[in-house]
Image (tube, grey):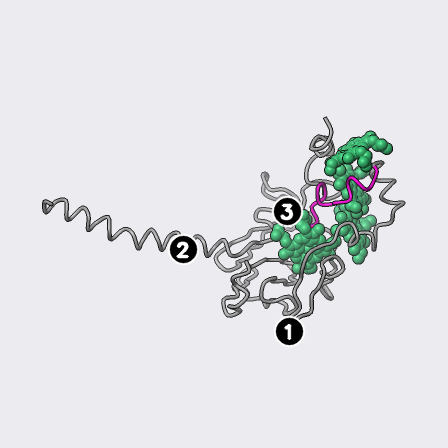
Amino acid sequence: MSNMQKIRLLFIASLVPIIVWIVFASEKERELKIVFPQDRSILTNPHVTVICKLNEDAKDKPHTLPNLTVNGMTHEWRKEYLPTILVAGVKLQEGLNWLQIGDAKVSVYVVGEKAKTPPADWKEIRSHPLSVEKEPTCSTCHTLTKGIGTPHLGEVQLPKACDACHSEIEFELKHNHPKRSIEHCTICHSIHGSTMSSLLKRTPKELCKSCHD
Ligand code: HEC
Ligand code: HEC
Ligand code: HEC
Ligand code: HEC
């Protein structure tokens, strides 16, 4: 091996830890999923329920909870569903707001009396009413398993979780479709954020096409 080859080899070898570090660092970022609010969204209600999900590995490491800052001010997470589900009820200001969640930065625009011109390419995003201003009511839809320690916010049983508030009559009126074949409501509805009316995921036409020609 020539000296030149040795130097090259050494150079490549020195890159390995850097690459490994980059891969791990990006893995780490993916541990956090921001469910609401989405970046670059327009909101009509200044009372926002911030919802994040940490992956299961984070469960044993509650000390790794990401910080939440709202327009530069530190904000506490609610304790109910820690450590995997992070919830905070925050009041935003009219106009542009910045949320920093761990390494992620989220910008949202709240329309109001004095703030009527959001950035042109941003979209209005709504979610199902949650009424978290007083108390998070997450368990009206999610099953809550009370083990040792904090309760775990689990699955949503469809359509049972919805039937508690949305009657059969309302369903028939709004859908004109046999319920048994579309009782998995989330085929069409996006509970935690949609840019469309009735919290739909796509246009009704596109939704029907996923099952009917
Ligand atoms: C009206 C019913 C309903 C309420 C209330 C509700 N959820 Fe959900 N949630 C759902 C459904 C349905 C899903 C399944 C995802 C979907 O929409 O397809 C879900 C999914 C989630 C997820 C996983 C999202 C993802 O993309 O991985 C998290 C986290 C979550 N909910 C947290 C919460 C928290 C926290 C609250 C209370 C502040 C809450 N939910 C209240 C119905 C609800
Ligand atoms: C095949 C797609 C699809 C599925 C699956 C579906 N929906 Fe819908 N839903 C729609 C569409 C489309 C509308 C809008 C109807 C309209 O505007 O007249 C709607 C409207 C609604 C509305 C009224 C919304 C409003 O704006 O007043 C409610 C409530 C609702 N759905 C609940 C449910 C529940 C609960 C389930 C599960 C049991 C469900 N939906 C499953 C497509 C679907
Ligand atoms: C605790 C009661 C409650 C539960 C449980 C519940 N909803 Fe609702 N839902 C409401 C209320 C209240 C509204 C607002 C009605 C209105 O604005 O007229 C609503 C509105 C909606 C809308 C229309 C939203 C919009 O902005 O147009 C849809 C779609 C919907 N619900 C679907 C669901 C689905 C799917 C589930 C089950 C995962 C569910 N809901 C569970 C109470 C509930
Ligand atoms: C998840 C798959 C799925 C989606 C999405 C879906 N359908 Fe259906 N649809 C079915 C099945 C399966 C049947 C057969 C009836 C049954 O078994 O419930 C059916 C039956 C029907 C019927 C016959 C109704 C009857 O009384 O026999 C009509 C009309 C219909 N669908 C229209 C629509 C429209 C419009 C949409 C979009 C809003 C839609 N479907 C979305 C699965 C779906």
- Give the secondary structure at mark 2: helix
In this rendering, the label closer to the viewer, 3 or 1:
1
The residue at which mark 1 appears reads as 148
Labels 3 and 1: the sequence-earlier one:
3
- Give the secondary structure at mark 3: strand
Q: Given the current orientation, which residue lies at the most extreme left position? A: 2
Residue 181 is covered by the magenta coloring = yes
**Residue sitting nearer the eye, 92 or 81:** 81
* C-alpha separation, residue under disc 2 versus residue under disc 1: 31 Å
- Is 173 placed left or right of 85 in the picture? right
Which class describes the residues within 10 Å of circle 1: few (<14), some (14-19), or many (20+)? few
Picture coordinates of residue 85, whole percent (x, y):
61, 62
The stretch in magenta equals 178-192
Q: Amino acid at mark 2?
A: Phe
Q: Amino acid at mark 3?
A: Ile
The residue at which mark 3 appears reads as 42
Labels 2 and 3: the sequence-earlier one:
2
Q: Residue at x 55, y 60 (%)?
A: 56
Quarter of image, res 118: top right
Q: Given the current orientation, which residue lies at the most extreme bottom position? A: 148
Q: Residue at x 50, y 70 (%)?
A: 63
Residue 114 is covered by the magenta coloring = no
Picture coordinates of residue 20, whole percent (x, y):
35, 53
Q: Given the current orientation, which residue lies at the most extreme top position? A: 213
Q: Which mark is residue 24?
A: 2
Picture coordinates of residue 14, whole percent (x, y):
24, 53
**Residue sitting nearer the eye, 142 or 103:** 142
Q: Amino acid at mark 1?
A: Ile
Which class describes the residues within 10 Å of circle 3: few (<14), some (14-19), or many (20+)? many
In this rendering, the label closer to the viewer, 2 or 1:
1
Picture coordinates of residue 37, whole percent (x, y):
62, 52
Q: Is most of the magenta stretch helix, strand or loop?
A: loop
